[in-house]
Image (cartoon, helix red, strand yellow):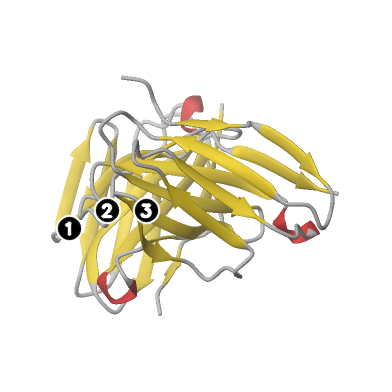
């Protein structure tokens, strides 16, 4: 079974631009979560989608948004980029949303650099 | 709110044993998970404890004490490939079931 895939792997943008990141979950997984990882803040939860519905949202400004499609693929969008948005953005998939086993399968991430 | 505390770094030699502690504060607790992340790689799931006690999986074991809001990951017979960051994580019922990670413990294994 193929793992979680994320595109693009690397991205360089300038302040004020917007960016869209894509995530394809493991086949059969309906839950997709997004995380931001930075050296100073660690792994921060952005949002979780299940069956095209946002189930949870982290404490990020409205510039961060996402969606999930009927095939469970997910995208996240960051508008009006700021220098502080430079980070590794990780996507993780799971069979269920809020599953008690907490096992999530992570993709390799998209490294976003904002100049 | 919720918070998890774990040491930032641990150094040990090959063959040694390392214990990574994690204390947490949540308003509704489901269980404690552990993830491993090598530099440049993605986090991978190691273990999950929902009930008190020790769970053993090969060289790695994880322990939970719900009454103490405390858990640990035990790495035995350390190998060079165990050099990585280790994160504890909880899913908090009081916070909409979202998964929250600790800051991570960087384990450096020396020959």
| Residue A47 spot, x, y in % from top left | 45, 59
Image position of B70 with respect to A18: above or below: below
Viewer-nearest of labels 1 and 2? 2
Q: How far apart are marks 3 and 2 (CA)?
A: 7 Å
Secondary structure of residue under mark 1 = loop
**Would residue B99 be seen by someone viewing this image from the given angle?**
yes
Pointer 1 residue? B50
- Specify the label residue A97 is tagged with: 2
Q: In this view, does B37 lie to the left or right of A94?
A: right
Secondary structure at numbered mark 2? loop
- Chain assignment, label 3: A
Look at 86% across and 49% down and name the residue there: A115
Q: Are marks 1 and 2 on the same chain?
A: no
Q: Which of marks 3 and 2 is nearer the N terminus?
A: 3
Specify the subunit that label 1 lies on. B
Q: Is mark 3 on a helix, strand or loop?
A: strand
- Asked if residue B104 shows in the view, the reply is no
Graded by Cα atoms within 10 Å as few (under 14), some (14 to 19) or many (20 or more), the crowding at tag 2 reads many
Observer-nearest residue: B30 or A72? A72
The quarter holding residue B46 reads top left
Disc 3 target residue: A49
Residue B76 position by quadrant:
top left
Q: Residue furthest front?
A: A70
């Amino acid at each position: 079974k193929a793992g979680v895939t994320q595109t693009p792997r690397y991205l360089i943008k300038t302040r004020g631009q917007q960016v869209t990141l894509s995530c394809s979950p493991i086949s059969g997984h309906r839950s997709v979560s997004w995380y931001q990882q930075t050296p100073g803040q660690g792994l921060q939860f952005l949002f979780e989608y299940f069956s095209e519905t946002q189930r949870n949202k982290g404490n990020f400004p409205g510039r961060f948004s996402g969606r999930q499609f009927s095939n469970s693929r997910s995208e996240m969008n960051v508008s009006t980029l700021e220098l502080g948005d430079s980070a590794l953005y990780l996507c993780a998939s799971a069979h269920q949303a809020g599953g008690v086993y907490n096992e999530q399968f992570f993709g390799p991430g998209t490294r976003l650099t904002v100049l | 709110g919720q918070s998890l505390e774990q040491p930032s770094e641990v150094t040990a030699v090959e063959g040694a044993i390392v214990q990574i502690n994690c204390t947490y504060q949540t308003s509704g607790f489901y269980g404690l998970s552990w993830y491993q992340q090598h530099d440049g790689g993605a986090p991978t799931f190691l273990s999950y404890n929902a009930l008190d006690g020790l769970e053993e999986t090969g060289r790695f074991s994880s322990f939970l004490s719900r009454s103490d809001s405390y858990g640990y990951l035990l790495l035995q017979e350390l190998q060079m490939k165990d050099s990585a960051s280790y994160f504890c994580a909880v899913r908090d019922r009081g916070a909409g079931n979202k998964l929250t990670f600790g800051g991570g413990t960087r384990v450096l294994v020396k020959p």
